[in-house]
Amino acid sequence: MERRQFVASLVAGGCAGMCVDLTLFPLDTIKTRLQSQQGFYKAGGFRGIYAGVPSAAVGSFPNAAAFFVTYDCTKSLLSAGGALAAPHVAPVTHMLAASLGEIVACLIRVPTEVIKQRTQASPSSTTYHILLATLREEGVRGLYRGYGSTVVREIPFSLVQFPLWEYLKALWSSRQGHTLYSWQAAVCGAFAGAVAAFVTTPLDVAKTRIMLAKSVCGQHTQGDLHQRGRVHLPGSLREGPPHFAVAARPL
C-alpha cells in the first residue's frame, strides 16, 4: 500500500468511525441497557442517554483507523499476487483482511467499550469514576474484560459484513456500468451491516453481559463477582434465543 493510500485509510476510517459512533450513541446506549442483565429500566431506561460518550469519543477515531488501515493493508498484500489474487477468491481475501483488522482494532476498542458500557448501565456514575473504579478493583486486566468474547463477536460480524458489502458494490457497479456514488456505497454498507448485526446479536449479548458483570454485580463481594463472572455466559445461554435477540428487535 502506498503512503497516500495509507494516510487516506487512516484519516477516512477514523473520521467515519467517530462520526458513526457519536451520531448513533443514543441507540447504542439503549441497546446496551436492553442487553444488560439488570433489565432496561434498572440500567437507566431513557435517562442519561449520553452516559459514557467521553469514552466513545476518545476511542472511536483510533479504533476505526486501526481497523481500516489493517484491513486495507492486508487486502492489498493478499491481492498483490498468488492464489488469493484471483477474482473468484476475493471474498476470502476480504474475510481474512477483516478478521485481522478486528483483532488489531479490539486492542483499542475493548478498554473504551468496557468503560463506555459500564457507564451506560450506571448513568448516575461518570466515565471518570467508572474508569477509576475499574482500575482500582480489577487493574488493567479489567479494561480488557471480554476481549475474547469481543473478538469472537467482531470476526463473524466482519466475515458477514465486508464480503457482502464488497459483493453488493461490485454487483451494483457492474449493473450500472460505472463506479458507485457515495450514497450507493452507503446503502450497500447499511444493508450489509444490518444483516451482520442480526446474525451476530447473540454473541453481542454475551459480550455485553461479560463486560457489565463487574458493574452490574457491584453490591456483591469480590468472591461473588468472580464466581458470577465465570458463570455469566452459560447463564445467558440458558435464557434462550428470545433474550439473545433483545437488541435485534425495535423498542
Image: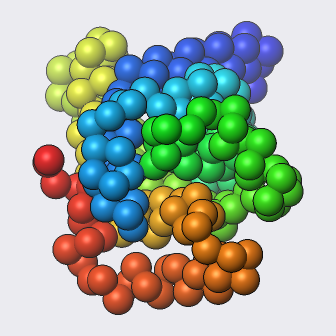
Q: Residue at x 52, y 62 (%)?
A: 216
Q: Is residue 171 left or right of residue 135?
A: left
- In the image, is residue 2 above or below residue 191? above
Q: Quadrant of residue 79?
A: top right
Q: Residue at x 66, y 24 (%)?
A: 58
In this view of the protein, can residue 119 be seen by the observer?
yes
Q: Is residue 16 left or right of residue 80?
A: left
In this view of the protein, can residue 167 be seen by the observer?
no
In x, y percent, where is residue 119?
Answer: 54, 42
In x, y percent, where is residue 1?
Answer: 75, 26
Q: Residue at x 59, y 33 (%)?
A: 126
Instruction: Pick the residue in front: 177 or 2.
Output: 2
Q: Residue at x 62, y 49 (%)?
A: 114
Q: Is residue 48 left or right of residue 229?
A: left
Q: Quadrant of residue 11?
A: top right
- In the image, is residue 144 above or below residue 120? below
Q: Is residue 48 left or right of residue 224?
A: left
In x, y percent, where is residue 199?
Answer: 31, 62
Instruction: Pick the residue in front: 122 or 247.
Output: 122
In x, y percent, where is residue 165?
Answer: 36, 40
